[in-house]
Amino acid sequence: MHRSAPRLARILACATVPVVLVAGCSSGSGKDKKDSESSSRPASPSASPSVAAAKFSKLPDVCSSLSGKTIGDLVPKAQNKKGKALPSADTNSSANCLWNGLDGFKYRSLSVSLKLFHSDAGLGSGDKRAGEYAAQQASKAATAGAVKDPKTGKAAGIGDEATTVSTKEKKDGDDFRNQTVVARTANVVVTVEYDGAGYETAKAPDAAGLLKDAKSAAKEVVGSVAKGAQGTA
C-alpha cells in the first residue's frame, strides 16, 4: 500500500493538467513532445499576391496625339486645330481632347480620351483593369442618350484589342452619325468618338466613311501612346 501511494498521486496530478500536456504525463516521450510543439506552431503566412508590372506609366499629351493633317482631314475648319483639352483631376491617368467644326453645313466632332491603369495587387494587372474599362466604354457608347441602331464589331490591328460601335441619333431635327472606337494598348484605353451631321440642305454623312476615319484616328493615337508614354510603372 505504501508503494502505491506515489503512483496514485502522479495519476491524479496528470488528470488536472490541460489536454495538450497529457501525452507528456503519460509517456514522457521526447518524440511526442516535439510533435505537440510542431502542431501548435502557427502556419507560415502565404506569399503576398503579385501582378505583372504595367507597361505604361504615363500618358502622352492627348491633344498632340493626332497630327495636324489628321485633324484637317477629319474636322475641316475646326474651331481650334490644336484641340480643346477637357478638365481632368489627374492628367497622368486620364486625359481628353475635343475638336469640332462646321464646313458650310457639314458638322464634324472628334474627341480622344485616354485612360491609364496601374497594376494593383488587390485589383489586378493594369492590362486586366484596362480591358474591363474598355468593355464598359463600348457598352456605354451603344446605350448612351437617345442613340439608335447600335452596331458593335471588332477591329483588328488597333492596339491589343479594339471594339467599334456605330449608332444614329437625332438632335434638334438633324440626323447624326456617331462612330466610336475603343482600343486597349497594354494598360491604356484609347476612346475615339467621331460624329457628323448635315445641317440644312446637307446630307447626313456616310457612316462607313466616318467609321473608317475613326479607326484610322484610333490607330494613330495608339501609336502616340507607344511613342510617348512607355516606361516602368
Image: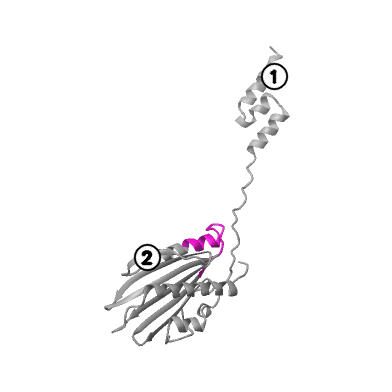
Q: Position of residue 207 (x, y in %)?
A: 37, 73
Residue 6 is labelled as: 1
- Which circle's residue, 1 or 2, is located before the other in the chain? 1
Alpha carbon separation for disc pair 1 and 2: 93 Å
Frontmost residue, 88 versus 167? 167
> Which residue occupies the extreme right position in the image?
30
Please identify the quadrant where the N terminus is shown: top right
According to the image, label 2 marks what residue? Answer: 151
Q: Position of residue 141 (x, y in %)?
A: 39, 68
Amino acid type of the residue tagged 1 in the rendering: Pro
Q: Is residue 59 visible?
A: no
Quarter-of-image position of residue 9? top right
Frontmost residue, 70 versus 230? 70
Crowding near pointer 2: few (<14 within 10 Å), some, many (20+)? few
- Is residue 223 part of the magenta span, yes or no? no
User: Which stretch appears magenta?
Assistant: 115-132
| Residue found at x 47% / y 61% | 132
Amino acid type of the residue tagged 2 in the rendering: Lys
Q: Is residue 206 left or right of residue 189?
A: left
